[in-house]
Image (cartoon, rainbow, N blue to C red):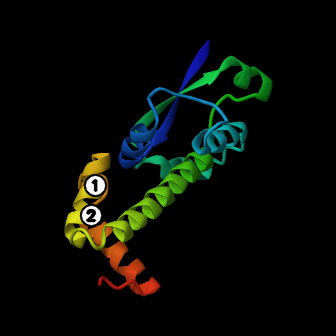
Amino acid sequence: MSIPFQLPVKPHIHKYLTFFFQEPYKLNRKDLFGKWLYYALRDQRDEGKYNDRLNPYTSKMTILVGRNYTFNNRMTGISAQATIDINNWIDELIKNQFRNHMISRMDIETYQESIQNFRKKYGFTDADLKFDCLKQDWYRFRNEKGIVKV
């Protein structure tokens, strides 16, 4: 039997996670997300100063925590700082995946088409990740790495 747990996440992170993982996500240590989450749930340093920073985390990802994890490892919740860290980590994954997507599609479609296709793949809207923010990130990354479209 598993105990449901609500992980606060930003809306675009929720869409990204549900693209790869079925919700509710059953906690395990077989994939990268599960390993990271396992250790975050064990960390119970609740630093109240971070609680007010959770306002943008309006979505909830349901995580099923098995009783063996709960009782054996004293998992009872997640701190505000661990919630922020998980969201930041997944944001970095999204950013890296976006950049790899752009590099792989350079010869096939325009930058604008490539950005729109990436957003469409995960169901991102302007409320989640704005087109202009992704475009700006791509131009900065491209210039920093010296990537030129042939």
Q: Position of residue 77 (x, y in %)?
A: 63, 32
User: How far is mark 1 from mark 2, CA to CA?
Assistant: 6 Å
Q: Are marks 1 and 2 in contact (CB under 8 Å)?
A: yes
Front residue (pair 108, 35):
108
Q: Secondary structure at mark 1?
A: helix
The residue wearing badge 2 is 115
**SS at badge 2:** helix
Q: Residue at x 39, y 86 (%)?
A: 143
Is residue 11 visible in the rendered structure shown here?
yes
Q: Amino acid at mark 1?
A: Arg
Of residues 48 and 36, which is closer to you in this image?
Answer: 36
The C terminus is located in which quarter?
A: bottom left
Residue 106 x %, y %: 30, 72
Residue drawn at x 72%, y 42% is 43
* Circle 2 crowding by C-alpha within 10 Å: few under 14, some 14–19, many from 20: many
Residue 124: in sight, yes or no? no
Question: Which label number is shown at residue 135?
Answer: none
Name the kind of residue labelled 2 in the image: Ile
Residue at 60% from the left image edge and 30% from the top image edge: 27
> In the picture provided, is 116 more to the left or to the right than 49?
left
Query: In the picture shown, does residue 98 fall above or below 103?
Result: above
User: Which label belongs to residue 119?
Assistant: 1
Res 95 quadrant in image: bottom left
Residue that protrudes farthest toward the top in the picture: 1
**Within-10-Å neighbours for mark 1: few <14, some 14–19, many 20+:** many
Asked whether, in this view, residue 119 is left or right of residue 88, the answer is left
| Above or below: residue 124 compared with residue 20 | below
Decide: is 133 above or below 85.
below
Instruction: Report x, y in % for residue 49.
Output: 60, 52
